[in-house]
Image (cartoon, grey):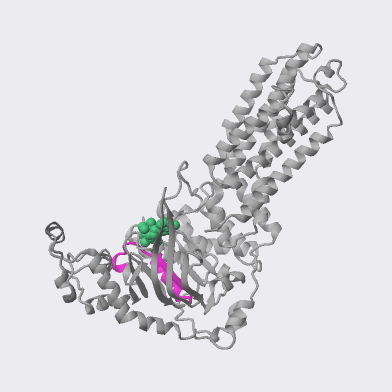
């Protein structure tokens, strides 16, 4: 669509062999100059700044695959994140432009959806199958102009492109569920991104953990994507020589500094021009990593460094008469600075080869969602139910609820409500019901957002849906089961314990319990969203639930005035009062238990909790940083 607007011939998009497009996109020229990144490390007593990237300059054009290479900890992931706009100021410095526009402008328009980012960690839902994962991503990410069938077809195309046909009905799996292999999981992550046919594709170690044939297949795919006019940037750990030759451009990093930027095919020539050549025939990637690590064991020592061989006896012995790694690093950085850096910086000044006012047009394009709000809600709702289907049919949970109900039924078997003593006993049962249904929902809800944090951050960074649609879908998809279990529970308890037997009382009891569950869930969601940490959340949750239970009006009836407000925050208190009212209003012995008012105050307080806690949770999620 955009290509038509700007005219395909307006833009030099590099060679195109194979068409992967689900929808036409526009080419993106990525330029970066003097990119730096620093973090502040806070110790017990000291605070120090650590510079992770030291002024990296380069560019990558449509039709090219740029590989970021370097030893572990050299800053590849950090650079990829800065280039992908995931790490921004104030920690990141320098300039990164897409089609000569800063990232922030790009982000404000719909163009963010033209960026695919495959992170190093595979963030996927473990209980969805490969096919479901890609299908839901297609529904949410592909443009509204495509029909549901077309979106499904695109998901299927990606499955075939990535060779995932055989495992499309297998669950992804995770720590507790056996699923697809690591390589297949990685390919699903890549599929999630190439699905949208991005103009700019970032990948963090797409081949780690894969056998060499599968790795080659992935890199070949990246090359095909680039050849379709896309810009691809990938970090890579230790590519085989077959893989290495597939990259167009290469950045070699060492301790966060640039050791080489240029054509991958020219890298060996460049290093031999500065006096570093392999002594034996070896894989170029291995040679470059040895250099970046400061290891000259199989490498000629540049003449400039011959007089810098370490004199310290032990070190000399260890390094077999080679210069120290620090000296080598310094030499490589300086050589690059003096011979290449200036030339590359000058190249960046050349404007991108487009005609007319493409920049103005690009920034005026409005962001579009892949689905309407309601579609997003219903897709996320369905996906939530699929992902948690095992919890829905968890016999363990059903058994737990039924077993508790039977024990209660036996302990309060056909309880007597005709005497004041019997009534006090029954009130104990009602209080327990208020506590039981205020307890479990809090803890299941605390887990909801912290467990999905990584996924939420990934999908929000990719602008897949509105937060409000996700929030509502996540908080309502658990409701059906949460409302079925109390029905089973009450049926057992009600008849075994011989509670007041009429339909009105039964349904009012059920409604009260529902209200209690939904309010308790709200508290759990708010705690989870505020802390975004399961351990901290469960600790705060248990203290809060215990306080609310103690203030619930059963254990202490006369609470000191300065702390009496706390009971109004307790959903146990309101639920218990409502249950007493439902069961004993107009009962001959009731005055000794409580004074009944209209009950509206309790209902109002519970409804305020249902919405108030959820609003708090939503605000916390909105404020969550995506980095
Ligand atoms: N937020 C941070 N706080 C402290 N140190 C950081 C932070 N981010 C990165 N680093 C450090 O910066 C260095 C570069 O990290 P980065 O993840 O970019 O390396 P990498 O080359 O991708 O490594 P690997 O190949 O092992 O993934 C590492 O030493 C890392 O510990």
Magenta region includes residue 89 = no
Magenta region includes residue 226 = yes
Q: Say which quarter of the image contains residue 573.
A: top right
Which percent across, then down, holds residue 320?
Answer: 13, 62
Q: Say which quarter of the image contains residue 232.
A: bottom left
Left of 564 or right of it: where is 335?
left
Q: Which residues are magenta?
A: 218-242
Does residue 287 appear in the picture of this structure?
Answer: no
Task: Give the mark count.
Answer: 0
Which residue: 71% across, 39% down?
A: 519
Left of 302 or right of it: where is 181?
right
Which percent across, then down, holds residue 25?
Answer: 56, 75
Which residue: 71% across, 28% down?
A: 552
Which percent across, then down, holds residue 251?
Answer: 36, 71
Does residue 573 appear in the picture of this structure?
Answer: yes
Q: Is residue 428 above or below residue 31?
A: above
Q: Where is ligand 1, by quadrant?
A: bottom left
Camera-nearest residue between 390 and 505? 505
Left of 313 or right of it: where is 502?
right
Which percent across, then down, holds residue 319?
Answer: 16, 61
Figure quadrant of the N terminus: bottom right
Which residue: 48% across, 73% down?
A: 96
Q: Residue furthest bottom?
A: 356
Camera-nearest residue between 345 and 463? 345
């Amino acid at each position: 669509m955009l290509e038509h607007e700007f005219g395909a011939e307006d833009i030099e998009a590099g060679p195109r062999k194979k068409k992967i497009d689900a929808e036409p996109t526009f080419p993106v020229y990525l330029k970066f100059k003097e990119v730096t990144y620093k973090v502040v490390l806070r110790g017990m007593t000291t605070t120090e700044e650590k510079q992770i990237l030291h002024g990296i300059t380069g560019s990558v054009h449509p039709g090219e695959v740029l590989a970021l290479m370097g030893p572990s900890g050299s800053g590849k992931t950090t650079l990829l994140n800065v280039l992908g706009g995931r790490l921004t100021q104030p920690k990141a410095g320098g300039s990164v432009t897409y089609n000569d526009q800063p990232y922030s402008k790009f982000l404000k328009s719909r163009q963010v959806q033209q960026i695919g980012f495959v992170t190093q960690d595979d963030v996927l839902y473990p209980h969805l199958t490969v096919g479901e994962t890609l299908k839901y991503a297609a529904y949410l990410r592909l443009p509204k102009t495509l029909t549901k069938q077309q979106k499904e077809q695109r998901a299927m195309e990606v499955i075939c492109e990535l060779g995932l046909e055989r495992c499309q009905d297998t669950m992804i799996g995770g720590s507790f569920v056996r699923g697809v292999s690591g390589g297949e999981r990685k390919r699903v992550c890549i599929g999630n991104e190439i699905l949208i046919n991005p103009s700019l594709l970032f990948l963090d170690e797409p081949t780690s953990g894969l056998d060499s044939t599968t790795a080659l297949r992935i890199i070949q795919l990246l090359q095909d994507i680039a050849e379709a006019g896309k810009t691809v940037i990938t970090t890579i750990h230790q590519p085989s020589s077959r893989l290495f030759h597939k990259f167009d451009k290469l950045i070699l990093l060492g301790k966060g500094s640039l050791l080489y930027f240029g054509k991958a095919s020219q890298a060996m020539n460049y290093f031999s021009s500065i006096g570093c050549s392999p002594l034996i025939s070896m894989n170029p990637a291995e040679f470059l990593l040895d250099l970046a690590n400061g290891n000259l064991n199989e490498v000629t020592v540049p003449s400039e460094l011959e007089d810098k061989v370490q004199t310290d006896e032990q070190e000399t012995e260890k390094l077999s008469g080679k210069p120290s790694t620090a000296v080598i690093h310094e030499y490589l950085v300086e050589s690059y600075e003096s011979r290449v850096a200036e030339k590359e910086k000058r190249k960046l000044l050349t404007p991108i080869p487009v005609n007319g006012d493409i920049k103005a047009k690009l920034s005026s394009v409005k962001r579009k969602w892949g689905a309407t709000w309601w579609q997003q809600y219903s897709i996320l709702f369905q996906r939530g139910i699929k992902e948690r289907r095992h919890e829905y049919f968890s016999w363990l949970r059903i058994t737990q609820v039924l077993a508790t109900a039977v024990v209660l039924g036996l302990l309060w078997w056909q309880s007597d409500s005709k005497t004041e003593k019997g009534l006090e006993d029954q009130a104990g049962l009602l209080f327990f019901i208020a506590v039981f249904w205020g307890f479990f929902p809090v803890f299941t809800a605390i887990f909801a957002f912290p467990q999905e944090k990584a996924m939420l951050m990934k999908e929000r960074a990719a602008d897949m849906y509105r937060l409000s649609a996700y929030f509502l879908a996540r908080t309502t998809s658990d409701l059906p089961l949460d409302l079925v279990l109390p029905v089973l529970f009450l049926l057992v308890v009600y008849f075994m314990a011989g509670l007041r037997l009429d339909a009105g009382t039964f349904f009012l009891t059920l409604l009260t319990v529902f209200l209690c569950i939904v309010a308790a869930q709200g508290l759990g969601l708010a705690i989870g969203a505020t802390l975004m940490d399961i351990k901290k959340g469960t600790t705060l949750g248990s203290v809060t639930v215990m306080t609310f239970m103690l203030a619930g009006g059963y254990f202490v009836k006369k609470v000191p005035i300065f702390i009496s407000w706390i009971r109004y925050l307790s959903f146990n208190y309101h639920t218990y009062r409502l249950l007493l009212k439902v069961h004993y209003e107009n009962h001959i012995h009731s005055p000794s238990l409580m004074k009944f008012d209209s009950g509206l105050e309790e209902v109002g307080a519970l409804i305020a909790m249902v919405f108030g806690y959820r609003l708090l949770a939503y605000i916390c999620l909105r404020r969550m940083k995506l980095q």
